[in-house]
Image (spheres, helix red, strand yellow):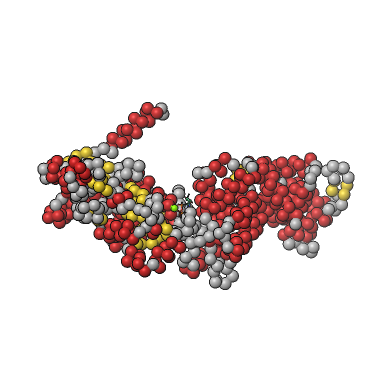
């Protein structure tokens, strides 16, 4: 599509958002659909659930967050249910400031940003439509026009609750421009937009110590005050503080707990009473969700200050811990990598898992449960089976450590370390060992990590390394076994030839030299032993095989590798045992012979084509896992 068409489409969509009418017409709209006059908390709640909700293992999962926030289902359920849902139903929490508390880089800002962007989008849809008095600097709810005397009746008729009173600017406008005829007041549909300063605000104090209250509540307009003569004339006031512009939506308060009390009281009065004081005016109504974020230390310091006691009880604290599931941690890294300069390099398979194991371990608390350790706990949390434990135990583990996840390694640290590994090593591919090395170097350079904490973290790097060693060995064996299907067949046929000769008292012909040989007893036994066939039972087993072969032959079928379950198992086990040697030899030799080279190349091809490796990390796996098997 060319640019002009695209812009035309965009303008058409925008036009659909422009509804304008009189207050009388708006009244009809509300009568048909009271939802359009709902309060900010309810709108946000409906926005979240409008994306869909599913239940996974008894925990609600909101699709709205699903592609951005990983591993925090319980946290988000609590946030949505206990705050937004309750507030939407006008329970008491609505009157409190929402404070997200959690460790650095734990997703607090991301959650707030999502709510803002989600609300912007939602108000552009038919379900999320909302309206405002045209020309109101705070884009206020048109129902504020209804005089208090008439409200009970109107509320009953419309099935809505009308809260708040006209802002000073609208009050003046109704009198001067409409001669008091509120039914004629112009109403427009609005779409919330942080960029346009409609309904979404961010308060970010440059310096919390030297703040201007005007940033929050607006200020006298010195350019027009001469014209209107008085500071209490709304035309000489700019209602452009963050509290004003965030009306109808959401206000993000950064560094809130660092603010001076006098600022905090404005926020509290707003959330508590739904209004705040500005300039020389009566209280100004506003309807907005105030959300702030902080870390645990800052919060504790705030609470321990006696002077903050009253404030404290008007804040609702939602802990936002780190994710504790390895598989979700990997998703977080993948997301962060997509957004970074790491997009271009190859991240070897298992590199992120190895890092995630380290991070998650650093966040877990030791359990007192019998036979439990951190690695088992980590696996249980991630839904893996751990011998001796049941899903019920996971619930108990959670109850045992209610504050788990409030400390440890943050996801950004890991990504930063991977980036720096990339810079210092100048490579096209980052593998699990590179990652662990980079994490370790990071600990060495980190001045704020205390010696015992450093020891603890080094221990987790060692565990992550051990976990990776297991993975690497299995991975390499698997790759070899797959490219060994041919060997399996050869070994199978070889065994049958020998069994036949053994049972019939004949010789075996060497396929290359043509020499007549006695059956290879050692070979047969080495296979049979894999499935526990004793010396006494070997004859019966071999005869049974021979009978099977002839039965197959009589029915015109071919007895092959897959025809005899136990024999196949024996062959595979034997191959696997041999594999260790083959891999050892194949991967440790500096000058592989043509046969070995062929095998190596075949394994590498498999790793690259089917298992997500590049040439570099496939060779690295061969070298490393080979050396592990050589120990
Ligand atoms: N559980 C998670 N799921 C998805 N992404 C996450 C998660 N935790 C952290 N992140 C990502 O890590 C990065 C840092 O998160 P964010 O900035 O939201 O953290 P924060 O809690 O606001 O940190 P700070 O206290 O430093 O302000 C973001 O890109 C965020 O998307
Ligand atoms: Mg943040
Ligand atoms: Zn107004
Ligand atoms: Zn690679």
Q: Quadrant of the C terminus?
A: bottom right
Which residue appears farthest toward the right when viewing the image? 515
Query: Which residue is nearer to you in this view: 455 or 303?
Result: 303
Residue nearest the observer in this picture, 429 or 174: 174
Judged left or right of residue 124, residue 458 is: right
Q: Left of 337 or right of it: where is 33?
A: left
Against 270, is 236 above or below?
Answer: above
* Residue 606 location (% of width, % of height): 66, 43
The answer to whether residue 495 is above or below residue 593 is below
Question: Residue 463: x, y in percent?
Answer: 63, 60
- The answer to which of 264 and 557 lies nearer the viewer is 264
Residue at the spot x=28%, y=38% of the render? 17
Residue 181 screen position, x and y as percent: 11, 44
Q: Residue furthest front?
A: 226
Report the side of 120 relative to 484 (left or right): left
Residue 594 % position (x, y): 79, 40
Q: What's the residue at 84%, 48% (across, down)?
A: 508
Can see residue 496? no
Q: Looking at the image, how many numbered discs can be counted on the residues?
A: 0
Along the line of sight, which residue is nearer the eye, 48 or 458? 458
Quadrant, the N terminus: top left
Which residue occupies 52% across, 51% down? 412
Relative height, residue 365 to residue 44 (above, below): below
Is residue 514 something that shows in the picture?
yes
Q: Residue at x 30, y 50 (%)?
A: 214
């Amino acid at each position: 599509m060319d640019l002009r068409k695209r812009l035309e489409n965009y303008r058409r969509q925008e036009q659909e958002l422009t509804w304008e009418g009189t207050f009388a017409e708006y009244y009809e709209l509300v009568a048909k659909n009271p939802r359009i006059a709902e309060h900010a908390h309810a709108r946000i709640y409906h926005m979240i659930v409008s994306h869909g909700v599913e239940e996974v293992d008894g925990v609600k999962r909101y699709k709205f967050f699903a592609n951005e926030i990983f591993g925090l289902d319980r946290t988000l359920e609590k946030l949505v249910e206990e705050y937004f849902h309750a507030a939407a139903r006008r329970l008491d929490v609505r009157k409190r400031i929402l404070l997200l508390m959690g460790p650095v880089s734990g997703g607090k800002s991301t959650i707030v940003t999502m709510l803002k962007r989600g609300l912007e989008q939602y108000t552009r849809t038919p379900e999320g439509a909302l309206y405002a008095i045209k020309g109101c600097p705070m884009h206020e709810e048109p129902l504020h026009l209804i005089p208090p005397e008439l409200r009970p009746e109107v509320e009953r008729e419309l099935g809505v609750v009308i809260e708040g009173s006209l802002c000073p600017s609208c009050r003046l406008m109704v009198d001067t421009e409409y001669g008091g005829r509120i039914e004629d007041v112009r109403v427009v549909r609005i779409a919330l937009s942080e960029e346009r300063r409609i309904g979404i605000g961010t308060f970010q104090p440059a310096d919390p110590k030297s703040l201007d209250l005007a940033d929050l509540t607006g200020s006298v307009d010195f350019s027009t005050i001469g014209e209107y003569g008085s500071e209490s004339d709304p035309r000489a006031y700019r209602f452009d503080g963050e509290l004003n512009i965030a009306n109808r939506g959401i206000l993000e308060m950064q560094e809130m707990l660092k603010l001076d009390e006098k600022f905090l009281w404005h926020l509290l009065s707003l959330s508590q009473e739904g209004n705040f004081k500005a300039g020389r005016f009566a209280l100004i109504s506003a309807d907005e969700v105030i959300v702030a974020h902080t870390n645990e230390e800052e919060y504790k310091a705030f609470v321990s200050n006696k002077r903050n006691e009253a404030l404290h009880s008007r804040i609702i604290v939602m802990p936002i811990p780190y994710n504790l599931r390895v598989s979700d941690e990997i998703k977080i890294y993948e997301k962060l990598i997509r957004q970074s300069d790491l997009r271009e390099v190859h991240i070897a398979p298992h590199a992120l898992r190895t890092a995630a194991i380290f991070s998650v371990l650093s966040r877990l608390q030791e359990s007192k449960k019998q036979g439990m350790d951190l690695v088992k706990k980590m696996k249980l949390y991630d839904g893996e089976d751990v011998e001796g434990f049941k899903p019920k135990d996971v619930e108990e583990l959670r109850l045992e450590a209610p504050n788990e996840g409030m400390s440890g390694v943050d996801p950004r640290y890991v990504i930063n370390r991977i980036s720096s590994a990339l810079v210092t090593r100048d490579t096209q591919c980052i593998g699990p060992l590179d990652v662990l090395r980079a994490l370790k170097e990071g600990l060495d350079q980190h001045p704020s990590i205390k010696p015992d904490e450093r020891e603890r973290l080094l221990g987790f790097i060692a565990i992550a390394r051990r976990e990776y060693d297991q993975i690497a060995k299995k991975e390499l064996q698997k790759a070899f076994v797959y490219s060994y299907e041919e060997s399996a067949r050869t070994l199978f046929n070889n065994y049958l030839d020998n069994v036949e000769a053994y049972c019939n008292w004949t010789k075996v012909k060497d396929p290359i030299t043509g020499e007549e040989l006695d059956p290879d007893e050692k070979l047969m036994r080495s296979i049979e032993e894999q499935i526990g066939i004793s010396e006494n039972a070997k004859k019966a087993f071999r005869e049974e095989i021979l009978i099977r072969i002839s039965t197959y032959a009589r029915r015109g079928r071919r007895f092959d590798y897959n025809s005899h379950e136990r024999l196949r198992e024996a062959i595979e086990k034997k191959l696997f045992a041999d594999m260790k040697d083959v891999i050892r030899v194949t991967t440790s030799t500096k000058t592989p012979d043509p046969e070995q080279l062929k095998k190596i190349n075949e394994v590498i091809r498999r790793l690259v084509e089917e298992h997500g490796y590049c040439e570099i990390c496939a060779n690295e796996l061969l070298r490393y896992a080979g050396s592990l098997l050589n120990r």
